[in-house]
Amino acid sequence: EPEVTQTPSHQVTQMGQEVILRCVPISNHLYFYWYRQILGQKVEFLVSFYNNEISEKSEIFDDQFSVERPDGSNFTLKIRSTKLEDSAMYFCASSGTEYTEAFFGQGTRLTVV
Amino acid sequence: AQSVTQLDSHVSVSEGTPVLLRCNYSSSYSPSLFWYVQHPNKGLQLLLKYTSAATLVKGINGFEAEFKKSETSFHLTKPSAHMSDAAEYFCVVTPKGGGNKLTFGTGTQLKVEL
């Protein structure tokens, strides 16, 4: 069964450092998403991406965040200068169309120290 | 704006007994509603979804949910719990036609005991 894969599963980084979270969406999907879950809080939408550009983003997705599809298979989330409050589980998802089921990866747990 | 409230953060049942996970929604628009499940170290998996057809929705692994507009509820049920059902369950809402910009509830941790 096709699945979304995320790497790494855990990442620890120092405050102020840049991190890149990687995702390989399902191969024939065209829509890509990032969500995050701070420990003890809700899963929150960050951004959606289609046709090589951001289609929608939340208030959380400020200038320190960026997304990219550098090649035909990867979808990345970059945090330029990490803060303690960026510590969270980050989920990548993809869907075939805007309105069909979103398939989620297993998440990357980011810890900023 | 839309939101969901999951009324129980933890639910514990015995194997073979019914499961009820409660969810109430608030939406300015006619909503689409989903239940997702997350097993340990796994991604979020779609259990079932309500868009606008039948109000009783059947999903995978014997789960079902009923959309009740008058009660603004979308509770998840299963007649007989199995040990493998132990996981975290998320009620999710999006405006109909709102694509995959999903609004999640806080989650309910289901524990299944022998």
Image (cartoon, grey):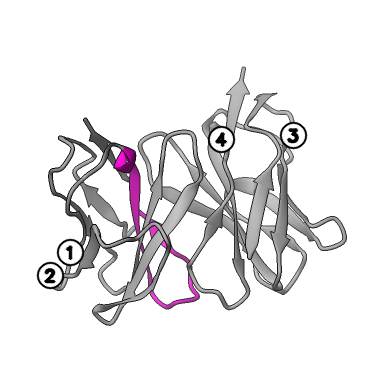
Residue A10, compared with residue B36, is above or below; it is above
| In the rendered image, residues at marks 1 and 4 fall on the same chain | no
Graded by Cα atoms within 10 Å as few (under 14), some (14 to 19) or many (20 or more), the crowding at tag 3 reads: few
According to the picture, the residue beneath numbered tag 4 turns out to be B85
According to the picture, the residue beneath numbered tag 2 turns out to be A70
Mark 2 vs mark 4, foreground winner is 2
Magenta run includes residue A101: yes
Mark 1 vs mark 4, foreground winner is 1
Check disc 2 and give the amino acid type.
Pro
According to the picture, the residue beneath numbered tag 1 turns out to be A74
- For the residues labelled 2 and 3, say whether their Cβ atoms are less than 8 Å apart: no
Looking at the rendered structure, the secondary structure element under dot 1 is loop
Q: Is residue A17 visible?
A: yes
**Disc sitting over residue B18 in the figure:** 3
Magenta run includes residue A104: yes
Check disc 1 and give the amino acid type.
Asn
Extreme residue toward the right, this view: B70
Q: Chain of mark 3?
A: B
